[in-house]
Image: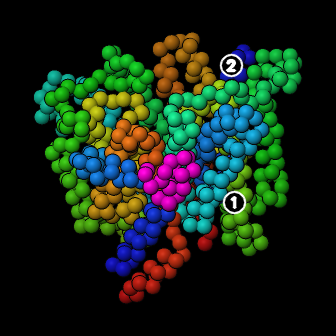
């Protein structure tokens, strides 16, 4: 318990450090830091109906972050959430286009399943390359992100192009309103239900099943798990597939929910933010939900800042980047404190 | 023919500079995913410097200093605070992209692209008609072969380069012969920062004289991919970066010639696919252990 408290304290201390660095940068760029933080706080949590907006961004982020958490727990540094998110959305868009005209009750679940399949496939090949040949998953999943972004450009300006679309950003034909699971504000009982189901399922999987225990053990010491007779590659592949499927599901939700169509380069920071959420939460599922709400608030503040406060939304990118810079930092002081309170092992 | 060579050199030069930055960091044992952020900071610093001071050397100096400061911050975080290099590197990239947008907005009051009245000096201005059609290229293109050769010599033929490689491969062994891995990493990251700044300067002021939001568009990551594809060797990585540039230029050419028959967008994915193939191949050849990033932790203890 004490160990958890100290790990939380250390995280909090580094987030404060990150915010101080942000303040320095804001001042350096010619903005008043207190005013900036005030506006961000207002945009994220204090304005009327702020919680709705924070939730709208938090739920898809939470789903992706749960996937990232499972992959990190298993010891695989899958940073390809962004690509898996895109491919999931692309699969859902193709299926939605293909089934156009069928009853919504059939189309919506099929689309979401297709999204999960797409995301899982986009995590499958880095998983196989890693487990079979030892090709580093950091590079393959990072390259996968770029390839998925290129695929998205191709799909939105080729096969699924909206002929009536104009402007610089290519986009696909909009989905029929009957197939949408929320309006463009993006909060609906369906999405909340999916996120809650994912959260409960993941919590049970991680904390209450043999698979969850094996995943965490394999992440720390794969050799030991192998010697105990578990098949490490099967655990690894499953964690790749689950993380891909959840990122893909988030892509499908964004498509069927708030967005309603594919646009090239939509939500470019989704995967990165999800990774941050998993790390801030120190890879616990409950923590992920809380962290997702925090980053969801920041994401909604990014829309609020330029419109109502006249400040650039890049401020939010800087806060995210600054947290990323410090979140994995460890200092000797905290390590020592933690060791002091560690219970002697039996 | 000369126009396609010019196109390849124009798109390839910034990429090679940023790749060399990645190579020196890689040899020090740092997986540098912050190159993208350094490069865009270099691009922004150069253009803002030219607009505000009216002098190219001052602008280049400013760009290099900004990138060195950011590199020192990165070094502090990954070396002194033991943060994960990959996450911190992605953070540095976010910092560069967000910071340049914020700075442009703050200085000019808008996020529109910034135009500079002039760019880096051209080859034609030095050699006159001797340069022929290649006179339009900037001096940084001319300097490139010398920089590559110097990097090769520095990393492969000097005491410093070998000590640096030792720090990257086996910091403990390096320390046992009196080399301080932490200090070597700082030096490598500072040099990498300066090189990435030059890459950004060439991108923004080499032929365009413009700074636009997010104008690096993943070139820093592509440079990182070239480092991996080129197995961390200065010449190999340079060739990999030039290969990426050739693929990009040929893709545009193919679209001009064949129209929509060739899906140009998908051709752009070739460099990334090639990198995945290269990583797979090197993992197979080396037995899969050495190429693994080890979660991006420094191998100090």
- Give me the chain letter of mark 1: B
x, y percent for residue A113: 24, 40
Quarter occupied by the C terminus of chain A? bottom left
Q: How is the image coloured?
A: rainbow
Q: Is residue B199 above or below residue A96?
A: below
**Tag of residue B186:** 1
* Image marks 1 and 2: residues in contact by CB distance under 8 Å: no
x, y percent for residue A3: 39, 77
Residue occupying the point 40% across, 46% down: A271
Is A300 in the magenta?
no
Q: Is residue B129 above or below residue A294?
A: above
**On the same chain: label 1 and label 2?**
yes
Q: In the shown orientation, is residue B104 left or right of residue B170?
A: left
**Rendering quarter of residue A283:** bottom left
- Give me the chain letter of mark 2: B
Q: CA distance from mark 1 to mark 2?
A: 39 Å
* Dominant SS type (magenta): helix
Judging depth in this view, the residue of A200 and B262 nearest the camera is A200
Instruction: Mark 1: give few (<14), some (14-19) or many (20+) Cα within 10 Å.
Output: many
**What residue is shown with label 2?**
B4
Residue occupying the point 45% across, 68% down: A13
Magenta-tinted stretch: A19-36
**Rendering quarter of residue A213:** bottom left
**Local SS, label 1:** helix
**Local SS, label 2:** helix
């Amino acid at each position: 318990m004490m160990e958890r408290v100290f790990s939380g304290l250390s995280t909090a201390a580094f987030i404060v450090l990150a915010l101080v660095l942000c303040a320095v940068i804001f001042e350096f760029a010619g903005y008043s830091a207190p005013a900036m933080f005030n506006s961000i706080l207002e945009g994220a949590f204090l304005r009327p109906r702020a919680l709705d907006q924070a939730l709208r961004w938090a739920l898809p982020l939470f789903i992706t972050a749960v996937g990232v958490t499972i992959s990190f727990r298993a010891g695989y540094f899958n940073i390809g959430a962004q690509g898996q998110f895109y491919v999931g959305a692309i699969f859902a868009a193709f299926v939605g286009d293909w089934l156009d005209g069928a009853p919504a009750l059939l189309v919506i679940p099929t689309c979401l399943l297709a999204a999960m399949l797409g995301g899982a496939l986009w995590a499958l090949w880095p998983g196989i390359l890693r487990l079979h040949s030892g090709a580093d998953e950091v590079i393959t999943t990072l390259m996968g992100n770029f390839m998925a972004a290129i695929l998205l450009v191709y799909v939105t300006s080729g096969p699924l192009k909206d002929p009536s679309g104009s402007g610089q950003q290519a986009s696909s034909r909009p989905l029929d309103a009957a197939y949408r699971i929320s309006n463009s504000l993006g909060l609906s009982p369906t999405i909340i239900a999916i996120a809650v189901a994912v959260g409960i399922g993941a919590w049970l999987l991680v904390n209450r099943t043999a698979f969850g225990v094996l995943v965490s053990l394999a992440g720390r010491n794969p050799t030991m798990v192998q010697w105990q007779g578990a098949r490490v590659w099967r655990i690894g592949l499953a964690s790749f597939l689950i993380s891909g499927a959840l990122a893909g599901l988030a892509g499908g939700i964004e498509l069927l929910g708030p967005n309603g169509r594919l646009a090239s380069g939509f939500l470019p920071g989704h995967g990165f933010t999800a990774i941050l959420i998993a790390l801030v939460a120190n890879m616990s599922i409950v923590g992920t939900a809380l962290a997702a709400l925090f980053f969801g608030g920041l994401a909604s503040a990014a829309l609020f800042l330029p419109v109502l406060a006249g400040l650039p939304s890049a401020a939010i990118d800087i806060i995210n980047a600054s947290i990323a810079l410090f979140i994995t930092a460890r200092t000797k002081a905290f390590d020592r404190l933690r060791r002091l309170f560690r219970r002697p092992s039996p | 023919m000369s126009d396609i060579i010019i196109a390849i050199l124009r798109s390839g030069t910034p990429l090679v500079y940023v790749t060399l930055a990645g190579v020196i960091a890689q040899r020090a044992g740092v997986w540098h995913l912050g190159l993208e952020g350094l490069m865009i900071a270099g691009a922004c610093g150069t253009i803002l410097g030219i607009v505000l001071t009216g002098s190219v050397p001052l602008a280049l100096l400013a760009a290099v200093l900004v990138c060195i400061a950011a590199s020192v911050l990165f070094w502090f975080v990954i070396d002194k605070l033991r943060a994960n290099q990959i996450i911190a590197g992605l953070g540095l990239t976010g910092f560069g992209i967000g910071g340049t947008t914020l700075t442009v907005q703050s200085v000019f009051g808008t996020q529109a692209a910034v135009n500079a009245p002039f760019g880096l000096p051209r080859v034609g201005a030095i050699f006159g008609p001797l340069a022929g059609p290649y006179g339009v290229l900037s001096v940084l293109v001319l300097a490139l072969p010398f920089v590559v050769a110097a990097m090769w010599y520095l990393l492969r033929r000097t005491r410093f380069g070998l000590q640096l490689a030792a720090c990257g491969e086996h910091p403990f062994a390096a320390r046992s012969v009196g080399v301080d891995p932490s200090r070597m990493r700082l030096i490598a990251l500072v040099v990498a920062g300066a090189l990435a700044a030059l890459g950004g300067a060439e991108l923004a002021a080499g032929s365009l004289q413009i700074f636009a939001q997010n104008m690096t568009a993943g070139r820093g990551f592509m440079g990182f991919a070239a480092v991996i594809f080129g197995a961390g060797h200065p010449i190999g990585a340079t060739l990999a970066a030039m290969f990426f540039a050739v693929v990009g230029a040929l893709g545009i050419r193919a679209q001009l010639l064949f129209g929509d028959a060739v899906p140009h967008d998908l051709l752009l994915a070739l460099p990334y696919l090639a990198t995945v193939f290269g990583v797979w191949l090197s993992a197979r050849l080396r037995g899969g252990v050495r190429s693994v990033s080890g979660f991006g932790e420094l191998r100090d203890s």
